[in-house]
Amino acid sequence: MSDHWFEPVADHLGTAYLRYSFTKGTRQEIDHLVPALGLEPGMRVLDVGCGPGRHAHALAQLGISVHGVDISHRFVEIARADAPAGATFERLDARSMPFDGEFDAVICLCQGAFGLMTADGHDDVVFTGIARALRPGGRLALSAFSSYFVARHWDGADFDAGTGVNHERTEIRDESGESIETSLWTGCYTPRELRLLCVANDLRVDSISSVEPGAYGSQAPTLDSAEFLLLATRRA
C-alpha cells in the first residue's frame, strides 16, 4: 500500500520521468545554486524529494557529499544506479525526516516533497523537517509553484483559491510508452507565504526570485513566472 498519492505515479514513470522537458535544466540549476549557497567540496547536502537523483548526481560530481531522500522506491532505485561517489539515497517520507542539524545545505527542488500535498497534506511539516535538518548557518534552496502563475496563466487549471492547491488530470507514459491517466496535486505559494514559513521555522530569508526550470537566477518575484526560488539561512 502506498503512503502517498505520488508513489504509483513514480512507479509508472520510472526513468521516463527524465524525458520531461522540466528535467533538462539540471546543470544550469546546479551552476546557479552552488555559488548562491556557497557550496564547496566536502560539504554535506540533503536533497529532499530527490526523485531519480539528477541534482544529487550533479552535486556529487563536484565533490559535494549528497544524501537524497524520496518516498518512491522506484525513484530511489534509479538514483542509486550509477550514482557517483559521494551520493547516497534512501526511501524516506519527507513528513517524518529524522535529521537534526546535520547538513550544510538542503535543497528541495521541482516540487520535491514540498508542494506535492493535497489540501489535507503536510507542507508545513515537510518544511519544518527541512529547516531542522540544517546546521546553524546552513543554507536552504527550495522551489515552490506560484499561485499567481496558476491563476493568471494556466488555462483549465482546477485551482482551489481557498487552499492554494491545484488539481490536474493528465496522461503519463512509462519507459515503453504505455500511458495511464492520473491526478496530480500541486501546492502553490506566494512569496509572502514562503516568508511566513521561514519566520515560523527560524530561517532568515536571503532572497526569493522568479524562476523557470533550467533558468534559475535572481529576478525579483513576478506574477508571470511558474516558480519561486527561496534561498534562506538557519539562524544560529
Image (cartoon, rainbow, N blue to C red):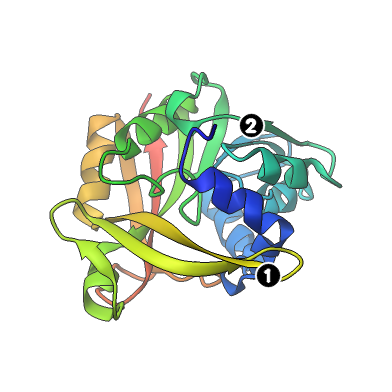
Q: Is residue 163 shown above or below 32?
A: above
For residue 104, what is the image quadrant? top right
Residue nearest the observer in this picture, 28 or 154 = 154
Asked if 130 appears above or below 173 in the picture, the reply is above
Q: Which residue is drawn at 76% across and 49% down?
A: 62
Q: Residue at x 23, y 69 (%)?
A: 148
Q: Position of residue 38 (x, y in %)?
A: 56, 46
- Residue 169 has which mark? none
Gap in Å between the C-alphas at discs 2 and 1?
A: 22 Å
User: Horizontal and vertical percent for residue 195?
Assistant: 24, 46
Q: Does residue 166 appear anywhere in the picture?
A: yes
Dot 2 corresponds to which residue? 91
**In the visual, does 9 lie left or right of 137?**
right
Which amino acid is tagged 1? Arg
Is residue 234 among the parts visible in the rendering? no
Residue 130 image position (x, y, % from top left): 44, 33
In the figure, is residue 87 to the left or right of 165? right
- Residue drawn 46% across the image and 44% down it: 5
Quadrant of image for the C terminus:
top left
- Residue indicated by mark 1: 19
